[in-house]
């Protein structure tokens, strides 16, 4: 994405000083826009095995978009004769000679996402209010008509954590609920389409 016109562009009219000021403040690329709103985030890249669907994590290297990918799947497969390594090839070679995963899998960093959410005072206060309101409704037996947010649902109100306490009974802690959305796409239709799909997983705190 770019909001900067090429030097060869011919405009039928000129902009006013105010319009030029607005244009100069516009981001020149998608990455610039994300950086402006502090929404860059961090992602982990995996090479998904086309045979067993195991996700093999790539190791980031110094430099932009550089990764060291495992060449073969290291998943342990349990079979009739015991446990063995999958060993399927994970990489394919581009026309320019570089390699990439046959099935790349991009996952946004959950710790990074949580840290950015908790640094937002508005989000933090909304999370506290939601759990405290839900716990108050439980203690008072307040009748709930309809569900406006997930913390009003019976499932959340009845849900208990590992310590046996209600999820909404937060004490001096913060309770966060998340959902994970996964999107898959097939870049080209082929007989091996299922082995060449691309997937993006996105955790979202709600």
Image: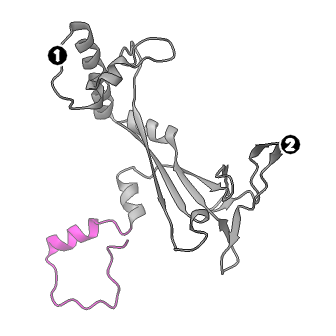
Is residue 205 toward the left or the right of residue 132 in the image?
right
* Crowd band around label 1 with a 10 angstrom C-alpha radius: few (<14), some (14–19), many (20+): few
Q: Of residues 88 and 41, which is closer to you in this image?
A: 88
The residue that mark 2 highlights is 81
Q: Residue at x 15, y 70 (%)?
A: 18
Which badge, 2 or 1, comes first in the chain's sequence? Answer: 2
Residue in the picture at 39% in, 31% down: 177
Q: Mark 2 to mark 1: distance in Å?
A: 59 Å
Q: Quadrant of the C terminus?
A: top left
| Residue 69 image position (x, y, % from top left) | 70, 58
Residue designated by label 1: 143
Q: Nearer the viewer, residue 153 or 41?
A: 153
* Residue 21 visible, this orientation: yes
Name above or below for residue 198 compared with residue 178.
below
* Front residue of 83 and 35: 83
Instruction: Tell which tag, 2 or 1, sits nearer the viewer.
Output: 2
What segment is highlighted magenta in the picture? 1-29
Circle 1 SS class: loop
User: Taking 141 as reference, is 107 left or right?
Assistant: right
| Circle 2 crowding by C-alpha within 10 Å: few under 14, some 14–19, many from 20 | few
* Dominant secondary structure, magenta: loop
Label 2: state its secondary structure: loop
Residue closest to the far right: 81
Question: Residue 128, percent across and down?
Answer: 31, 23
Count how many numbered circles sit on residues in the image: 2
* Residue 65 in view in this figure: no
In this rendered view, identify the residue nearer to me: 192 or 108. Answer: 192
Query: In which quarter of the view is residue 67 placed?
Result: bottom right
């Amino acid at each position: 994405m770019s909001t900067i016109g090429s030097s060869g562009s011919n405009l039928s009219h000129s902009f006013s000083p105010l319009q030029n000021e607005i244009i100069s403040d516009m981001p020149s690329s998608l990455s610039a826009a994300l950086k402006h709103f502090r929404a860059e985030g961090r992602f982990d890249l995996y090479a998904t095995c086309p045979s067993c669907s195991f996700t093999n994590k790539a190791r980031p290297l110094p430099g932009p978009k550089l990764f060291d990918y495992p060449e073969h799947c290291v998943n342990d497969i349990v079979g009739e004769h015991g446990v063995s390594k999958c060993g399927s090839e994970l990489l394919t070679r581009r026309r320019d000679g570089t390699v990439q995963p046959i099935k790349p899998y991009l996952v946004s960093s959950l710790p990074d996402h949580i840290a950015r959410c908790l640094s937002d005072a508005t989000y933090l206060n909304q999370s506290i209010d939601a759990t405290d309101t839900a716990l108050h409704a439980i203690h008072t037996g307040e009748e709930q008509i309809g569900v406006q947010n997930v913390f009003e649902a019976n499932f959340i109100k009845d849900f208990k954590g590992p310590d046996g306490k209600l999820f909404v009974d937060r004490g001096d802690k913060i309770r966060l609920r998340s959902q994970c959305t996964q999107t898959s796409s097939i870049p080209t239709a082929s007989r091996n389409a299922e082995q060449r799909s691309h997937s993006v997983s996105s955790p979202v705190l709600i």
